Amino acid sequence: METVPLIQLVDASKIYHLESGDFIALDHVSLEIGENDFVAIMGPSGSGKSTMMNQLGILDVPTTGQLLIDGQDVAKMSNLERTHLRRDAIGYIFQKFYLIPLLSAYENVEYPLILKYKKRDTTGRAAAMLDAVGIDQDMGAHRPNQLSGGQQQRVAIARALVNDPKILLCDEPTGNLDRKTGLQIMDILVDLHHKGKTVIIVTHDPKIAEYAKRIITLEDGRVVGS
Amino acid sequence: MRDIFFDLSVRSVRLNFLRSLLASIGIVIGVVAISSMGMLGTNMQLSVKDQLSSNVNTVILTSDVVKVSSTAGGVAAQNGIDKSELNDIKSSAGQNDVVPIHRSSTQFTVGSTNGRGSIYGLDPNDIQKFLTVDQGTNIKGGNDALVGATLASNLNIGVGSTLKIGQNCATIVRPIVRVAGILQARGIASDNVNADNGIIVSDQWYTDHFGNKDVYDQVNVILQDVDTINQTEANIDRKVNRNTNVIRISDASSRLGTITSTLGTITTFIMAIGGISLVVAAVSIFNVMMMSVKERVQEIGILLSIGTEKGEVRRMFLYEALILGLIGALVGGLMSFIIGYTVVQAMIGSTAYFFRPESLIYIPYGMIIGVVVCVVSGLYPAWMASNMDPIDALRSE
């Protein structure tokens, strides 16, 4: 039986209709990413990396073509179904961490569990996840603005993993960190890949891309190397 | 354990405490305005209703059937209610007091001064059911009489004075009554007993001198509850007028109804003026909520991108509006109690009706309106937040 790729872009384009004319951010892109893949998406500024990231993260849908996650066409899903797919199947790690400022580190990690199960976490999963990325209980009580960049990114990784998603989408995950902390974060991501996660990293740093098994290069919205 | 979206809302309110407080003050003012004005209007209505009820809680029964009787002044024709009709009235009036009244106009003399006025014959036990003796005592002896306040004042009549009743005529010896008490002034009485300018004697004395024993000029039914007036009138009408329409039944409730209705309109009007402050408060809450949404665009982007449903984002902002509303309503409710009490005391001069349920109900009314106004003001900002594009929201700084 043929294995369905975890993520599949089929002749997908994203066109923004601007006053100055149409801007093609993704131009007839087709690619497949399988389970337990480790992919780096690279390219210069304006090459379509962010647009690609938004498509793969189901934050947006292609103007033409298809995006299939686990064989399901996301364009045919309702808004609520896409929201649930984002919540359950994808973990996001952003360059700017994007933790919720009003919640503590622990609550930030607990939050996706609350979204999924509609109740506070009583299983200890959120605390265990924080512990796994090296954030202890005391640190977990702090608000994001009381943590260092590295600590915030660890919390963001814990938040991304807490619902056990198949896909980890990382947008310049080391971009706001010093080299040493960045390497620590990459070690965590490599470890997660070894544990079976599909890791997709968007980066412009070749040294970070070296961690990936496969590098997809974009230029002017087209895949020029894979 | 509390809803995390409620927690987020509470924390947002705390984070912008001063701004939230100022917005809530608008609601406080609105709630106080509506509640206080409502309470003031209701207290005015209750006060006026009670004042008028002393006159209008009476059903007046008279007869159109002409009866001829001999009086101290000669032979007179007058309308009357007989004993059988009185018994019918009593049996259909329920628990209410039934007061049969003899009434006539007479000349009298105090010292050397002649006067003319109404004379009423009443059972002494009925007198204090609707009249108040201000000085002296009620009628005790057969020749005792009570005199109205105006008459006593005009003719300088005091307790112990004597009055000669009947037309001043050198050939007739007129009966004399002794003034046992002076009645309290009652103003214009709509129960047809204008005692201020009248003389009250016992029914026995009256019929001894004016005749008409067991025939009454008027029967008053004094109601315990003015709201039962229509029902009581209908009961009496069914009983006494079952064959022919011999008893005329009247009251002053329609006048009370008009006055109460007018005061109700005034109350609604002044509450509407108070409501304007709530409109201002609603604009303020709307503004605060829009600011909250604008300041938290990126946070909304984060929430939406990691799988928060639109409804959950909406709920978070509606909670925030609800918290502002609840704070405003609670403080407003408390202040309404204090300010309402002060306003009622200052404007009406009495807080006798302030603690009545129909007065205090305006506090929860005002509070509910305050909360609803807040939540309604938060609807559009909440809708706007939930419908943001997560990509654009994440990009905003």
Image (cartoon, rainbow, N blue to C red):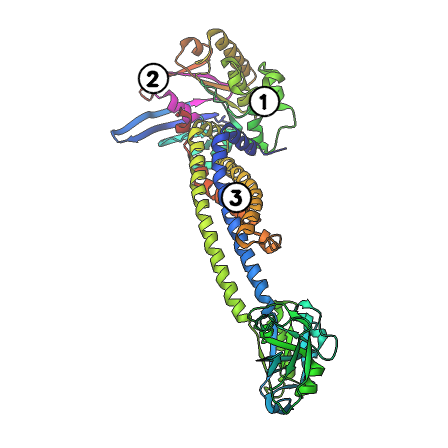
Pointer 3 indicates a residue of which chain? B
* Part of the protein shown in magenta: A32-56
Q: Residue furthest front?
A: B112
- The residue drawn where x is 59% and y is 91% is B77
Three-letter code for the amino acid on which mark 1 is drawn: Tyr
C-alpha separation, residue under disc 1 versus residue under disc 3:
33 Å
Specify whether disc 3 shares its chain with disc 2.
Answer: no
C-alpha separation, residue under disc 1 versus residue under disc 2:
35 Å
Based on the picture, tell me whether residue A97 belongs to the magenta stretch. no
- The residue drawn where x is 43% and y is 45% is B279
> What residue does disc 1 label?
A106
In this view, the residue in front, A157 or B52, is B52
Three-letter code for the amino acid on which mark 3 is drawn: Val
Where residue B371 is drawn, which disc sits there?
Answer: 3
Where does the image place residue B155, in percent across and percent down from the top left? 58, 74
Vertically, is B79 above or below A14?
below
Based on the picture, tell me whether residue A49 belongs to the magenta stretch. yes
| Residue A77 visible in this rendered orientation of the protein | no
Q: Earlier in the sequence, mark 1 or mark 2?
A: 2
* Label 1 secondary element: helix
In front: label 3 or label 2: 3
| Residue B210 visible in this rendered orientation of the protein | yes
Vertically, is A128 above or below B177?
above
